[in-house]
Amino acid sequence: MNIVLLMPQSARYAKDGAFDQRLRYAPLTLTTLAALIPPELNASVRCIDEGNEDFDPYTVEADIIGITVITGNAPKAYRYSSILRNRGITVILGGVHITLCPEEAEQHASAIVYGYAEEVWPELLRDFVAGKLKKRYDRQPVTMDGYPRPRRELLRKDKYTTMNVAQATRGCVYRCTFCVVPTAWPKQYQRDPLDVAREVAEFPGKTFILIDLSPTSDQAYFGRLCDALAPLGKYWGGLATLNITDNPQLVKRAAKSGCRGLLIGLESQNPKSLKAMGKYWQKPADNLWRIQMLHDHGIAINGCFVFGIDGDTEGVFEETLEFVFKASIDLPRFAIATPFPRTPLYRQLDNERRIISKDWGWYDGQHVVFQPKGMSPERLYEGTKMVWCEAYKLTSIARRIMTSAASLNPLILATSVGTNLGYNLYARKYPKFMPIPCEGTSWFNAPDYSEAHQPTNLTLKGMTV
Ligand code: B12
Ligand code: SF4
């Protein structure tokens, strides 16, 4: 049996941009699915990450194709699926968007996998071989332990910054209104820290990445994880919430375990916006000392901000920039708020008839798909673009890096310079992005997902940039 596993690239994403190769680490989705294929099927498997490899649905050879779908690439995945099924190839869709919108996805697939696949993907493949494929598979695993190692050798390692990527936890206990995680994966799973350490010990080289979304929410678990990683003598980057700094001892253990960088969703310096997004536990007034504590422990910050949430006004861009410099954020990132389907933010905006476009192709965190409260959609797009460009001017990069205590560490300094230059390129490409979607702008003719959708009366000019 011939299996192809595909991760389509969102068409509006900067395929030729910095993210294509320079800033991308290898995702675990395809390699995890490959590892779960039952050995007795004697299947040959090929993983295609369209971000760095071409995919042609008219010529690809396969008996069955599994496609992983996020919202921004859903229209493209559906179109691929239609072409492939017309050619007689069985198409299975899975991933976060399929878990958010299973009813929609079922119309575009031979079968769908809802949620995590560890339990059902092997069963689905056996059913396929037996000619008994069901339309939907959704039995969720009860643990993260005991699964085979992702088959990393199936991705082209020259195309990523690193293949050393692991996952210790899944899901998140928080409930931020804009985030897909509480809707798609509301329960947190934790893997035995010693098993994570065994996997990391197998990685070549001295550095690795943990993609866990919120591993620090259970501080006792996170402490055990750090203690298990510390003896390996490796360095790692991951994600955390800023309340890791509630416990300075935990920050110390993280640093001792080799943590040298954390992606933190700072989101906003505006308490009203934080309240609106359900991140009430984050206090902007405390951000400076918390970030300083991490810097003092040699941990660099990849700080993420989101613009356009109710509470934001036109001043938000300047205010955020000012904070970015004041806090010496080593690597800031800025997204446009996106009401991913089924999230509380989506429901709110839909009820208020503020959604401009339900064409999922625009849902990538880089385009305005709703009417913001405190500014025009054009201002939201332009403001975000301005912040990217200002934060990544060469003088701005130097200013941020030189004032961050984390830069005293040569490994951090080198990584920081490299990634900042990558984002400098990304920011310079930003103006070439597509305009704000207008009502009626069609992208692969994605079906309208919401029965409740009523066209708004907004008419927006496409922006020429
Ligand atoms: C690594 C990563 C990336 C990498 C690689 C891309 C990728 N899609 O993985 C990079 C950095 C490039 C990236 C970029 C972006 N990402 Co990203 N990324 C992740 C991250 C952190 C990990 C993905 C991963 O490896 N997971 C581990 C694997 C094992 O889990 P999994 O993918 O969920 O797969 C399991 C199940 O879902 C299921 N499954 C998944 N697919 C399939 C397919 C089949 C056939 C089957 C049977 C089962 C199945 O089986 C797997 C095993 O249980 C996730 C968050 C997360 N932790 O999942 C966000 C996430 C997927 N990214 C997200 C977003 C928004 C983006 C960007 C748009 C961000 C931006 N504005 O730039 C871009 C878009 C990239 C693109 N392709 O267009 C969102 C998606 C939200 C949505 N509704 O679309 C997520 C969920 C983060 C979040 N909290 O919002 N991302
Ligand atoms: S934004 Fe982060 S903290 Fe909030 S729910 Fe999503 S993963 Fe959890």
Image (cartoon, rainbow, N blue to C red):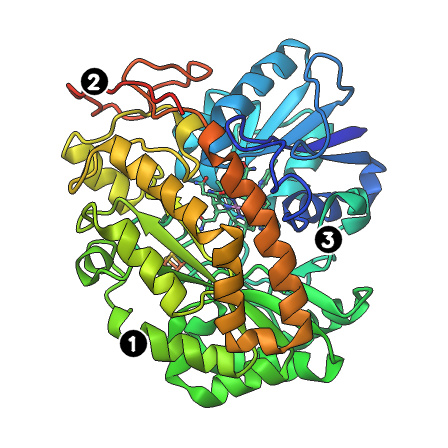
Disc 3 within 8 angstroms of ligand 1 (CB): yes
Q: Quadrant of residue 441?
A: top left
Above or below, 335 against 378 in this view is below
In which quadrant is the N terminus drawn? top right
Residue 72 position, x and y percent, is 47, 32
Residue 390 position, x and y percent, is 42, 49
In which quadrant is the C terminus drawn? top left
Secondary structure state at the residue bearing disc 3? loop
Alpha carbon separation for disc pair 1 and 2: 41 Å
Alpha carbon separation for disc pair 1 and 3: 39 Å
Marks 3 and 2 in Cβ contact (< 8 Å): no
- Tell me the tag on residue 150: 3
For mark 2, what is the residue?
459
Marks 1 and 2 in Cβ contact (< 8 Å): no
Nearer mark to the viewer, of 3 and 2: 2
Left or right, 125 with reference to 442: right
Above or below, 199 against 58 in this view is below
Going by the numbered disc 3, the residue's amino acid type is Pro
Q: Within 10 angstroms of label 1, few (less than 14), some, or many (20 or more) residues?
A: few
Q: Where on the image, by quarter, is ligand 1?
A: top right
For mark 1, what is the residue?
286
- Of residues 49 and 175, the one nearer the viewer is 49
Q: Within 10 angstroms of label 3, few (less than 14), some, or many (20 or more) residues?
A: some
Residue 239 visible to an observer of this rendering: no
Residue 2 position, x and y percent, is 80, 28
